[in-house]
Image: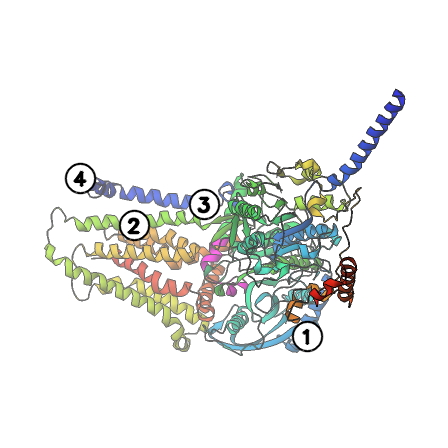
Amino acid sequence: MGLLSDPNRRRALISLLTRLNAPICVVCYMAGVAWFMGLAFEPFTLRTYMSENAMGSTMVEERFPAGERALGTGREFSAHKKKAGGMPVDWLVKTMQSRGLEVFTQRFSRRLPFPDEDKERYMVKGTNVYGILRAPRAPRTEALVLSAPCSPGDDNNQAVGVLLGLAQYFRNQVFWAKDIIFLVNEHDLIGMQAWLEGYHHTNTTGMDWSPLQGRGGSIQAALSLELSSDVVTSLDLVLEGLNGQLPNLDLANLFYAFCQKIGVLCTTQGKLQRNDWDSVSGYSHAVQTMMLMVMKQASGRPWGDHGLFLRYHIEAATIKGINSFRQYKTDATTIGRLLEGMYRKLNNLLERLHQSYFFYLMPSLSHFVSIGYYMPAFGLLALILLLRALDLWIQLATPPTFNLNPPPSQMSSPGVLSVLTPLVISHLTGVALYTLPIHFQEIAVEHFPVSETEAVVLTAIAVYTAGLALPHNTHRGLFVPPFNGWKVLKLVAVLYLAVLLGCTALINFSLGFILALTLVPVAAFVTPDVPKALSAFIMVILSPACTLLFSVFLFQELQEMPVSFLDGWMLYLSVISQGILDHALYGSLVYPLVALLVYPCWLLFWNILFWK
Amino acid sequence: MLAIFAVQLTLAVLVTSVFACIQYRPLLFFSSGHTNNWAVLVCTSRFWFNYRHVANTLSVYRSVKRLGIPDSHIVLMLADDMACNHRNPKPATVFSHKNMELNVYGDDVEVDYRGYEVTVENFLRVLTGRLPPSTPRSKRLLSDDRSNILIYLTGHGGNGFLKFQDSEEISNVELADAFEQMWQKRRYNELLFIIDTCQGASMYERFYSPNLMALASSQVGEDSLSHQPDLAIGVHLMDRYTFYLLEFLEDIHPSSKANMNDLFKVCPKSQCVSTPGHRTDLFLRDPGSALITDFFGSVRKVEITMETINLTEPIQQTYSYVDQLPVSEIIHQKPKQKDWHPPDGFILGLWTLILLVFFKTYGMKHLKHIF
């Protein structure tokens, strides 16, 4: 007979499972964490390589000559920007036209749900200016985008200068097979969102924009340039986009290949690559780089203007110029040549980038870990939940040895109801957490001396904390739930958490893994029998909100800018407000996921803890 | 007496031998047995990064044309248009040497099969001659049993196949069968097959028809490598084997006596990295006696004869030109026969003479028997 259909063997297996459940869970957890940490160890990673045959090697001759002129244009742009007090639309239109591009503008406006204190904006009105360089001999079916943001103050002037310099140089070449769109967007991500929505005729976020007059075919790849100084010491590649989506690895490979060819120092996450992988400090450096990428991906926000392109299946990345105190400096001509080389190679593409990986982690720019290698780390954590669920199922299936109070017949129907009530109430709390902060900000501002942003954030925290009080109230409800009802609830909750985390990890591995790290121990070990005070404290520490708080501190540590507790707290509040704003403005899914699904799930476990 | 006889004998022998030598030379001229040359040059890959395959084919085209084969006898099949590709920084050119030394596209290239017309089916139809009646002459291989054909294939290949256009393949078995069809239909006298792909030697493994000679740029399990990239254009310009083949062919002129053994030495492993291979077991002549120009050029043969040719009696009747054509019978309803009429009065005079002689001889009394 088979292993599972033979009753003797099945009983033996079941007893094994029940006896060893806790140790196996602990081992799985350790293994999962160890696997994850091992991902940054260089022998376990692969070197990056160019997968797309059409792009081939870096076999082009870059001849961009006009770096200094580009910087001069940047200074002109800066002067006009100061004069216009925003985007110098007329000057940009005139300059682009003089370079032979077809220039169009787009106006957009948006009222944020509450004022954004980080960027100091509430009612946003702006104009995007873009010029299309038509391919001399090709039909207008495909396009590439080069964009630079028009930032307030002194930022990114050189980026616009280099963009215009490249536009002039590209106009003189005959080998372009795709249209190239040079875009200067105002109000960074909001302007970019308006432009993309206008280009693709979609309106997902309720923004007001004027339709685009000129169009260039389907966009194959996009690069966003951020350059705020005349010389740079290194170029940083930013890959993480909205909802943790990453561009195709070939784009990063292309960038790295050209950096090596031209001899520019290139980094990812702002961290320079090290060669000593076998030393402790080398390994910890790689771990730090990978953790930075994981945290940025988990936050679900686009970390550069490129982040919004990814949703339309356009591979995009942001290149930031960093000027730190290093001896060897790279000038604008070299940056122009690097971009020229990249665009010439992207020009050779026949199809969209699809040969390389879409899901990966990069402990450094020359090494990567693909989804096949990092998923088992999450799988081990999810296994704990499944083991727990099996254990509970077995316990529920076998009647207890002696059963004093409720007769067994009473188990079935109130069982469903006893599960349903906490589920519904938790999810209603989640809905409250999702909707109340924004809707009641006016009332909050009336009654309390806080600004709107603070009102929103503090309402969110208040609703969250109020949810903690719930278990004491649900039980004074309709009926007295049976003794073992918590097991059914826990079974449902554990399976629910497993499915939720599994789906999250598929789309955004980092978010799923971080949530799993903290929620899986909670789910595995909470029962009404554990000491209440201690476990309540541990549960609160491991709840999503505190995970976020710790992540903020960890993120600052990893970026080598540690903050004090008070600053960290303010940063935490701004992170919450940014998360809510990202959801409202660009459709980021982290805030609704946490509010509507993860938090109710955690509340279910909180319910189980206080089960009477 | 004996001395004179000996001298006469020597002289006779000398004259005969000289006579024989001179007579032997014409035989040398026709030792290959072919009277016309054809070339089928095929590039099977498309896309910009396969620039080098088009450049390969065009280089061989250029050599073959330079050595005398006219466009009407060349079937050129190019699967993609590199000269007018949007990504070509020098439009209307295809270069085979970096720094743009040699433009093999030129201004008199005649491509017979272009773009998507280069398919396995079309290639096999060209070889076997089974083309629809509407196919123009420039797309046909109109060879006969005294044609020497050069077939050059380049593209991406593997063990036993050659990829056409990224969507189909021709296998070595199909190719061998096509050549056998050509042999049975007497469509070639001798055939030289050159292939420049990865694992090219696998393509000639299955040949079984006589008079085939084959060369390949690499053995089974080896890759044929490209030669040099041009940074301004951004692609590899040529494959190694064809690059050195082109260099070798640039030294050949129409009266060159270089033979196939020299061709086998082109691109040794030190230059090509792969090992070129060749197959001559099906070839009935010795490869050393086969000249390069037997296949790559179209050398007009001049026959020197030492004989005198006796012309026959001049034709008594002369026809006007028009009457020699079959149409003359349609135009003139009846056949025009020139009957011979004797001169006028000749019969009368003749009979009178006969009668006079008769009566003179036999007397006048017989006259009444006649009248």
If the image is split into quadrants, where does the C terminus of chain B sit?
A: bottom right
> Which residue type carries mark 2?
Leu
> Which residue type carries mark 3?
Met
Q: Do the residues under discs 3 and 4 have CB atoms within 8 angstroms?
A: no
Task: Report helix, strand or loop for mark 3.
Answer: helix
Q: Earlier in the sequence, mark 2 or mark 1?
A: 1
In terms of image quadrants, where is residue A487?
Answer: bottom left
Q: Mark 3 or 1, which is nearer the eye?
A: 1
Name the one closer to the observer, B60 or A371.
B60
- The answer to whether marks 4 and 1 sit on the same chain is yes
Residue under mark 4: which chain is it in? Answer: A
Q: Residues within 10 Å of mark 2 (few under 14, many from 20)?
A: some
In the image, the segment drawn in magenta is A293-309
Q: Earlier in the sequence, mark 3 or mark 4?
A: 4
Q: Which residue is mark 4?
A: A8
Q: Is residue A604 above or below residue A187?
A: above
Residue lying at 42% horizontally and 63% vertically, measured from the top left: A590
As measured in the structure, the alpha-carbon distance from the residue carrying label 2 to the one carrying label 3 is 23 Å
Q: Do the residues under discs 2 and 1 have CB atoms within 8 angstroms?
A: no
- The answer to whether marks 3 and 1 sit on the same chain is yes
As measured in the structure, the alpha-carbon distance from the residue carrying label 2 to the one carrying label 1 is 63 Å
